[in-house]
Image (tube, rainbow, N blue to C red):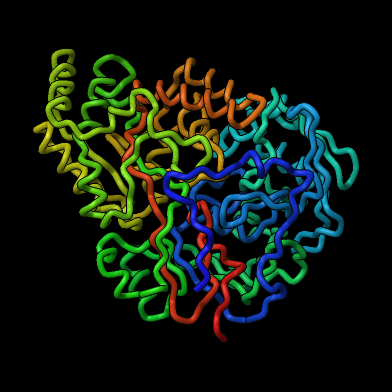
Amino acid sequence: MRIPRLLAATGALSVATVLALAGCAPSTGGDGGGSSSAIVTTNINEPEHALIPADTNEVGGGLALNNLFAGLVYYEADGSLGYDVAESIESEDNQLWTITLKEGKTFTDGTPVTAESFVKAWQWGAADPELLNQWWFANIEGYSPEGGEDSLALEVIDDKTFTVNLVAPQSDFPLSLGYTVYFPLPEAFYEDTAAFGEAPIGNGPYMLSDTGWVHDERISMVVNPDYEGPREPVNGGIDLVVYATQEAAYADLLSDNLDIIQQIPAGSLATVADDLGDRAIDQPAAIFQSFTIQVGQEHFGMDEEGKLRRAAISHAINREEITDVIFEGTRQPAVDFTSPVIDGWSDDVEGSDVLEYDPELAQDLWAQADAIAPWSGQFTLAYNADGDHQAWVDATVNSIRNTLSIDAVGVPFPDLASLRTEVNNDTIGGAFRTGWQFDYPGLFNILGALYITGSATNDARYSNPEYDELIRSGSTADSIEEANGFYQQAQEILFEDMPAIPLWYQSVNAGHSTVVSDVEIGWDSWPILYKVNKAE
């Protein structure tokens, strides 16, 4: 088995070198042309929403879209940047960007991919505040949180060229363009968006098969014969299979009925080496795990009482014991709000001692909060049962219960979609599991997405103008190095307010069957499916 170049747990990915776009050449993914007709299978959660780029922000739908579409750029296994549809992305001031497309690109309905395909899709995504990814366009001039048609400062120069005028200079703008929200859309999308979301017409290495998306079962894709890009598949297609539990997926893997499992269930980590041998994969990934309490929850607001209780809860969690016992040492206790594999990560941000297990301090902080407003009731931590979270949730609430002498319990939801529905509707009540799989390898991706005022992925509904200003300063800095300095200052505020409780950084503990080879897991924890060979 060929293992990808691993990123050290305390190392840094040099994004600055990636941004030398004029000299960045695409790679040739695999042998090309589909050397096998066999279908590669991997497990996913049932997507939360229709498969529309501007309205998909969870991993099940994201993995599907990333294989059905080709964006301007894409990410290699190590997080480095390569061109897909883009020929060049250039700017003299990091604010006005000119993007030129390659010739001859088409959607699977035969229509051409043009500059208008990108511009119209971005304008559509920014127009509706109900879309989960609308906020991603906030860095483009003309954006309004209230939406509005054709508001963004985008200009089509010709069929292969368009410009993007940002609100302010942004040094990592090209790096972000591999994310789902920036994918192009064909004209057929606007004719019937609902139908399109069930059966997307993309321009990527794969296209939907005749069976397509069967809800709660699988999303089936075959090779797109017209795709000519750096991600040419070496297999005949992929099936993204929905499982109710990780245990069920692992059982299928052991019997070669599933080719790739993206995360070994916690209960099998102790035996995975014996089960899989060199077919087991263990590597760091850009995944941050936490749980969140919305700021409108009684006793947990952004006032003195709420901040005391949030800090007390954090000090009451024995992260080291949980990662050792539940996860067999395959997780690393968090020391910040980002990920060790992302450039700019630091283990000495001021205030990070709030993540240390300290029962006496936790009890004292809880008592101080009780002096302001006495606690009563039950502390609940909700999670999706289809994601193998019960063991760590039980251990976490036990740690909180035993330390603070309060009633603390885990609350299972049947699947991720049902949990996220309650979160998005602000009807969740109590705390709930949250995590972030980075969309692109930059600190802004998580710090801007999860905690800046008004972001659709700001599950805590947190707002702090000082934090927002530091994030804006970082995003408009002249270099990534300068930007990261602002982001570390912003994290100091997060440690004071604790809108989420950081838990640990998740490694990829994946595995594959005996009938596939050349399995690589990317920096973002997703399998690179177009490279996977499978025996006929």
Q: Nearer the viewer, residue 317 or 296?
A: 317
Q: Nearer the viewer, residue 275 or 371?
A: 275
Across and down, in percent, residue 423 comes to 39, 38
Q: Nearer the viewer, residue 124 or 28?
A: 28
Residue at 39% x, 69% y is 280
Q: Nearer the viewer, residue 94 or 266?
A: 94
Quarter of the image for residue 167 reads: top right
Across and down, in percent, residue 9 comes to 42, 48
User: Can residue 191 be seen from the camera position used here?
Assistant: no
Outermost residue toward the bottom in this view: 536
Residue at 20% x, 34% y is 357
Is 414 rendered above or below residue 378?
below
Across and down, in percent, residue 60 comes to 49, 56
User: Can residue 129 be seen from the camera position used here?
Assistant: yes
Is 199 rendered above or below residue 177?
below
Quadrant (top left, top right, bottom left, bottom right) of the C terminus: bottom right
Across and down, in percent, residue 217 comes to 46, 67
Residue at 39% x, 65% y is 243
Side of 41 relative to 301 (left or right):
right
Is 261 rendered above or below residue 19?
below
Residue at 53% x, 57% y is 522
Q: How many marks?
A: 0
Side of 254 relative to 530 (left or right):
left
